[in-house]
Amino acid sequence: MPKSGRLIPPLKYPASEEGLVFNCIYVIEPPFSLYVRGSFLLSTRLFTSVISTALSAALLLFTLSIPAHAVPLEKPQLVSFTFTPNEIDQKSGPNQVDFTLTVSSPTGIYNQSATINLVNSLGNINLIATLKRTDSPIVPSQTLVTFKGSLSIATNIPAGPLFMSVDNLYSLGLNGNKGYPNNTFYPSKVRELVGATTALLVRNNGILSYSYPTFIGPTYNDPNYLLPWVDPKFALASYPYWNVGEIFNPSDYFEVGVPNMPLLVRTTTPRVCSTDGKTMKFIAMGICDFTVYTAKTNDYLEYDFYSTADEYNNPIMFARSTFKLRAPSVPAQLTTSVGTRVTVASVYDYDGATIIYPQTLTPSVCHPTGVNVNIASVGTCKLQYVTLDGTFHGADTATVTFDIGTPQTINVSTVKKQTSINTPVKLEASASSGLPVTYSSQTPKVCDATLNTLVPIKKGICIVTVSQTGSSTYDPATQSVFVKIK
């Protein structure tokens, strides 16, 4: 039995001058039990007319079948969300706040009102402002809708920011029912106050009393780097040493998120750890109780972190020893050492057995490989040795400097700026190394330089170069002299 409702392709398509011959079979299975097979002749003109008419009818039928508002349903989109004033003071007033909310949707907005929720930072105050549509009469299919309303803030509301949001707005759906709900709408940024850039501020005599975490930390409580650190230095922050003589600087372990708000520290155990308010020094063995905090301002309440020595409550321990690296001295190297290497004495760490290898501070002049230093060029080589903090000793850095080829300069005594053709000029020059210098004329047609005398030849500018070729210790040096021959 053939499949129901399936058009079997034409058996053949014989062409003729009158038109096209179509052979087709169309079968419909039960319950209709219809089976049709046959041929018909369709003229070319009639074929074109039939096709055109069929397409037009199909397009009209499709158009009529689409509802007038059948555009893609979308969630309502926020156009603007404003309020004025953006802060009030319970002492001076006024305490009425006006809200304007504008939203859009290609199918229209279902709601006749909008609700703004206002919540304080502690979550124990929740206010509601109801906004009404401004279009009158209300046209649900209107694609751009504005809601307006007001709210009087009671004078007994505690100071602090009120955060606003709008939910439960719907686009206009099919048959005028609810479409899609909006994503939560929030006001635009109205100020730079960290943590309350979009909130309504409620002050009391100028004081906001905002309970806000103004800093994060400490790093040693966050070994997996899970807190939202901004400064990359905290990713590499070391663990503090709780030893006598150590300095604890809060800014090394806590990061402030509010500009121009300094970190402070206080202690209730001054005999163990003393503080100047900014840093803390461990002065004796025992328990150190301290608090890192930011002070109260007109905007923020004091925010603090209390600790006892460290998170494991370990007491302050004995002082770590002072360890000094014993760096070797390296003599000056001759210029002929360029391209070779120099072996320097080994430097040992605190344990006396671990070798600390140098790092170069002048890679264009020298670069070490283990205890061997490769000489790349003349100049001054600077090597640095570093030992890190240890449980029993502090860090130390030592620098070793040596020259490869000693620089020298040419000193030329005062020479007349000009002379006549018949007047030779005596040249007097010396090298800072004490090595002999030579003279040569760079303008032989104007002047000659024999030994230490400039001999004019004709009018013009005479250029004499004084040179010192260098030695196994000193670098070459030159100096030019300009004299006008008139």
Image (spheres, rainbow, N blue to C red):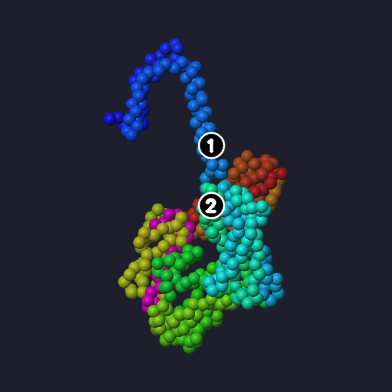
Q: Residue sitting at 71 percent across and 46 percent down?
A: 420
As displayed, is residue 118 above or below residue 180? below
What residue does disc 2 label? 177
Whether pointer 1 and pointer 2 mark residues with C-beta atoms closer than 8 Å, the reply is no
Q: What residue is shown with label 1?
A: 64
The CA distance from mark 1 to mark 2 is 21 Å
Residue 377's x, y, as percent?
A: 45, 54
- State the quadrant of the N terminus: top left
- The residue range painted magenta reads 373-393
Quadrant (top left, top right, bottom left, bottom right) of the C terminus: top right
| Residue 378 painted magenta | yes
- Looking at the rendered structure, the kind of residue marked 1 is Leu
Residue at (47%, 72%) from the top-left corner?
217
**Residue at x-position 52% and y-position 32%:** 59
For label 1, count other residues whose C-alpha is less than 10 Å away and answer few (under 14), some (14-19) or many (20+): few
Q: Is residue 289 magenta?
A: no
**Most extreme residue toward the left, as rendered?**
1
